Amino acid sequence: DIQMTQSPSSVSASVGDRVTITCRASQAISTWLAWYQQKPGKAPNLLIYDARTLESGVPSRFSGSGSGTDFTLTISSLQPEDFATYYCQQANSLTFGGGTKVEIK
Amino acid sequence: EVQLVESGGGLVRPGGSLRLSCAASGFSFSDYDMIWVRQAPGKGLEGVALITSGGDYIYHVESVRGRFTISRDSAKNSLYLQMNGLRDEDTAVYYCARDKEGDSNLYYLDYWGQGTLVTVSS
């Protein structure tokens, strides 16, 4: 089975900062990758699919890149509502990364 | 408006059974693959099972294979997860989710329910 590894597991940042989260697949998965945001006590929310396509309604400060084994989620200017946990997911299976918690610095 | 509403969670003893339901509305349920995802307290997300739109392909993650069974009833717009032989490690919030792609073998989960808590404890 393909494993998904996210780094870092947590990051402290301030409003306005640029934040980058990395997801690495144990085997090449083309661009078959999604990113989700989850806030405490809530269901996850799809942000990006096909590695770089923004889901409808998601702010443009979120962007995704990568293909093969290495992927990145970037928040260009962190907003107060962006403090949450982010997960990557390999799209042709149900495998998720371990999550990255974005905390207030 | 797309809605997914889970029910059926609760407290159960190890070795016991539960059946989770997910009532879908606001979209053509029979056209979409559906997935169950769980999240243990304080932990990350784990995909548990999926069923294709026509029910012709079913997958269960290895940790639940042989104990859990996903099914659907398109006449009732409902998704189910029959859970037998429950273990302590099955304690989690269980979410049902819709695959936005419809009929591909890529699973992007665009709508999620609010989740139902399953607690396995003696």
Image: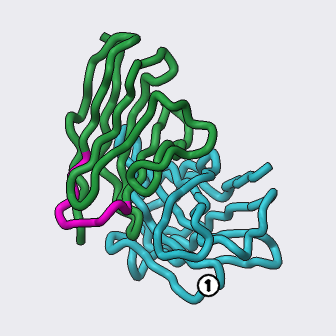
Chain colours: A green, B cyan
Q: Residue at x 53, y 63 (%)?
A: B36
Tell me where residue B15 sits by quadrant.
bottom left
Q: Position of residue A18 (x, y in %)?
A: 32, 21
Q: Nearer the viewer, residue B3 or B76?
A: B3
Q: Residue at x 65, y 71 (%)?
A: B32
Disc 1 marks a residue whose amino acid type is: Gly
Q: Nearer the viewer, residue B58 or A71?
A: A71
The residue that mark 1 highlights is B55
Q: Residue at x 47, y 60 (%)?
A: B13
| Residue A40 to residue B93: above or below | above
Question: Which span of residues is magenta-colored?
Answer: A23-32
The crowding category of the residue bearing disc 1, from other C-alpha atoms within 10 Å (few below 14, some 14 to 19, many at least 20), is some
Q: Indicate yes or no whether the magenta region holds residue A24.
A: yes
Q: Indicate yes or no whether the magenta region holds residue B109.
A: no
Q: Nearer the viewer, residue B86 or B32?
A: B32
Q: Position of residue B116 (x, y in %)?
A: 60, 50
Secondary structure category for the residue under label 1: loop
